[in-house]
Image: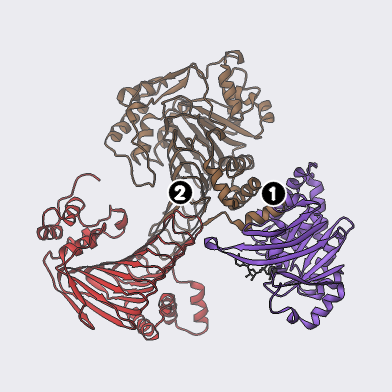
Amino acid sequence: MGVAMPPNAMEAAFLAQLDENVPAREMLAEAGLPHRRIEEWKWSDLRAVVGKLPAEPGVLTFVAARESDTVAKQGQESALCMPLLASALSKELHIYTLKNGETLELNVDASAGFTHQQLLVLVPAGIKAQLLEHYTVQSCAFANLTLTIVVETDARLDRVVKQDAAPEGALVLTSLIKLAPKARMAQTTLGFGARLARIETHVSHAGEGAQIRLDGACVVGAGLHLDQTSVVCHEGAHGQTDELFKTVVARDGKGVFQGKVYVSGGAQKTDARMQHRGLLLDDKAEIDAKPELEIYADDVVCTHGNALGAIDDEALFYMRQRGLPEAAARTLLIESFLAEPLERIEDEKVREHLLALLRTRLGVVT
Amino acid sequence: MPAIKETIEDVRRLEADKYKYGFTTEIEQEFGPKGLNEETIRFISGKKNEPRWMLDWRLDAYRRWTRMAEPNWAKVDYPPIDYQGLHYYAAPKNASKYKNLGEVPQELLDTYKKLGIPRKEAEVLLGLEGAGQSAAEARTEALSGQVAVDAVFDSVSVATTFKEELAKAGVIFMPISEAIHEHPELVRKYLGAVVPVTDNFFATLNSAVFSDGSFVYVPKGVRCPMELSTYFRINAAGAGQFERTLIIADEGSYVSYLEGCTAPMRDENQLHAAVVELLAFDDAEIKYSTVQNWWPGDVEGKGGVYNFVTKRANCHGRNSKVSWTQVETGSAITWKYPSCVLKGDNSRGEFYSIAVTNGRQQADTGSKMIHLGRNTKSRIISKGISAGRSDQTYRGLVSVHGKAEGARNFTQCDSLLIGDTCGAHTVPYVETRTPKAVLEHEASTSRLSEEQLFYARQRGLDEESAVALLVNGFCREVLQELPMEFAVEAQALLGVSLEGSVG
Amino acid sequence: MLVIDNLQVCVKMEEGKGRHILKGVSLEVPAGQVHAIMGPNGCGKSTLSYLLSGREGYEIIGGSMMFEGQDLAGMEPEDRAAAGMFLSFQYPVEIPGVPILTFVKEALNAQRRARGEDETSTPQFMKLAREAAAQLDITHEMLKRPVNVDFSGGEKKRMEIFQALMLQPKFLILDETDSGLDIDALKMVAEGVNTLRGKERGMLVITHYQRLLDYLKPDVVHVMAAGCIRETGGPELALKLEEAGYDKYAGGGA
Ligand SMILES: Nc1ncnc2c1ncn2[C@@H]1O[C@H](COP(=O)(O)OP(=O)(O)O)[C@@H](O)[C@H]1O
Ligand SMILES: [Mg+2]
């Protein structure tokens, strides 16, 4: 609405790199980077945060277990601002086609300055594969990454995303996931936040009878901000979505959960459930949540729940009565609270790794 | 054909004539000038002989409004409103000046009859001389029992019943236009105190042009001896209705207020932008119930009331309590979020809502609970039923501020879909800034169950009754919150609104 | 009273496919008699009870079912109920928010209106309800709850018989009303059913166990397997089945 704001340094740097007439340029010139007056970003003011970061190009280091299968020129159009910028401002698109039984590890490290990158991961029909991602963002870095994932018919993908705490950096990781008929996918995120980190996942149940489990565990410490946003869109009938997100916020950290489930008129027999639970540990902690349903089909089961609060005093007392020191009891409670989504990871090695990581990091944060 | 399919088909065929309040009253109307400018405001203010401060207040609101933009975030879709094509004042000629029954136009009496207001009470409503004495009599005849009624007919309040009896208890209940003259100190102090002039586009518009509405003041320690009630009715064509209600419950007092709304069937859309302000001091309680049945438009979405309403309560005092209960079946477009600002420690806010949309209706409605004080509690129970080609959104906000230790909220939003051409949406916003609060939210969406329908029919209920029974069951938690007389009316209304869900 | 003649039924499935379930069922229950149907799981007993009461989702591909000379096929469920057909469901459905007494009163009066009878007054209704409840050991508190919500399996079955006592139907179908009941509850339920026994009434009792039949003393016992009545006999047939099981009938029907 209204008058365009003058671009900040970061926006100006992006505009300088963009050709005339490309959609990304128009969008950026008109609306700027996402900010709190944009409904979808009302609790995560990206524009304000990255406006203060150095507006010069940085370096993105990819350490992958193997080379990508293809490198293509960008061609992806998106209605979403950040993917649109990622495709317009990155040089090339890496494409991975997963093989049956493959576990692909991707370690991404962003140095100071801004970086944009786009990836495409294809999971061919009938196969089973794993994708393990790990993101590190250095001080003064702003990384904007977009992953497009296509899971073909009857294929199965297990995805785990780890995001390290980045007190002086910003990260926007957007995943655009398309599920073909009977495709199955499970995604688990373990995130620790940044000056501003947003892990945004869009899932389209494009075909019939697809399934997704979408989980996340977030631990947000002092001065950090982590935003878990998801939009799951049911277009095909008989789709299933099961979401479980947990957020723990300490000190003056801020956790954001936005989860939307959209069920179109044709998506009868959809079964979609979404749960978000948040724990606030300290007086200055903040959690904002918006679990959303938009439903146009009548023969569906759709539910969501959201519960926010502090550690259960009674449980704490019970444990102390049995002899646990308060601090230990507290940690145990927080740990088991966050472990629930991680426990749902099927691969035992990966699951144990994430649980161990959670345990070591929790001590630092809380 | 499966029962549900049939239901759906029938709902689609829903005819306009099911709306029994859709009559117009053929009486001579006096209109204000068309369009909105300072002259219009001066005209309205002049009509009511308002003091200078009131005119200035309106003009200030008007000037601010001209710089505001209509909000567009709600999930409703309607053609642009031509604010210059509307009348902002309409009144039955010579209203409230009748000397005896013979002078009252028969049409107006008929209107009240159709609205279900008994004749005796209507006489009182119309302000007939001598009718005051018959108030007690009227009361015993009134179906609704001990209820004092204020009726707002287009822009003016026609009369208020039982004024004297209430006065004995010290309760002030009168049209706000009179209160401006009789209790200027109260009106001046509290008007706009809960919903500030610039709160939002529609509230600011209302502040500029509001015509009438109810004013209630319940003094310290007084339990209002009867339910207070207002009937709102839009009658005149091409006129907007902008009523303004202000209820103040002083320390330790209690009042229950009921509001009912109807409008005639018209092809063009009617605009209704009301503001309701509630203020509860220490230990006071206000119960505010609404049955909103404005004309929803016909099956194709032609006509109907645009209902843009700002309702807010300030639970200002310790242990104060406000509860909003609403049954919303009418209006083409609804934009309404009754709210509570829980300022006093231990204060409580409640919101119980049933919303039914059918035909082409669109409703974006819900509640806001703002927790500022310690140990504040809130509860939101919302039941939405969508049928036909309608679209319904629950939109709510629960916000807990850093100092609101011990705050608690429980929210439950259930949607029921009848057919696959309607939509049901839930958009709750939850914000908390203290670890010492507990907030819970649950939502579900389901449809009328074939199993349950069959079970009820196996026991002998026909489909119409079975559907009505199931819908009433779905809404039970909310219906229980309504005052007795209203609950019966509301249940009947649910039936009528979903009529056509029956063979 | 009830005459079922060579009834053949398909259950409608998704995408227009059908599955043949009842493959020619014939039986006749004269007024005043109690017939039992026994048979292995999945043989079509519940399907028959749903068919008689008018549930959707089935296609009759042959045969007929007549109730007091009226063809049931094509009648709405509520019209069959008003004509006196009562089904005690194998799995009674929960209806949140609708108090049981409100429900039964509405149902009773709807049936009475359909039959051209006067409605029952509230005091009269309450008197009946208290008596029926006492007979089945149903507490006042239980009567205040919504239909079947938060009741145990056995309590639900008792509530079904409570409704039968209130509605006084001409014909009762009990679909495994005994499963999930302990000995005391079974006795209570059976006594409730027995008070309904009379010259004018017929009953079709679907069960797996002799226990219930010990109390109800059926006139005729049918054995159903794979969608057909395979044997019909007196009460002794039930005893024989209890010993030998359904093995004899395994391996397909007609
Ligand atoms: N809606 C349905 N769709 C497919 N099969 C069904 C359906 N309803 C019943 N059946 C099948 O019909 C058979 C008979 O079921 P039922 O009448 O419930 O048996 P029972 O004798 O145990 O009561 C079973 O094999 C069951 O699986
Ligand atoms: Mg069965």
Chain A: its colour in the image is red
The residue positioned farthest toward the right in the image shown: C199
Q: Earlier in the sequence, mark 1 or mark 2?
A: 2
Q: Residue at x 31, y 29 (%)?
A: B59
The correct choice, above or below, for B163 with respect to A65 in the image is above
Q: Residue at x 79, y 45 (%)?
A: C120
**Residue under circle 1?**
B461
For residue A138, say whether it is visible: no
Q: Are marks 1 and 2 on the same chain?
A: yes
Q: Quadrant of ligand 1?
A: bottom right
Chain B: its colour in the image is brown
Query: What numbered label is drawn on residue B366?
Result: 2
* Residue C96 figure quarter: bottom right
Identify by letter the chain in purple: C
For the residue marked with disc 1, what is the amino acid? Leu
Q: Is residue B476 left or right of residue C194?
A: left
Q: Residue at x 58, y 48 (%)?
A: B6
Near mark 1 (Cα within 10 A), the count class, few <14, some 14-19 or many ≥20, is many
Badge 1 marks a residue whose secondary structure is loop
The residue positioned farthest toward the left in the image shown: A16
Mark 1 or 2: the one toward you: 1
Q: Give the Cα distance between marks 1 and 2.
A: 33 Å
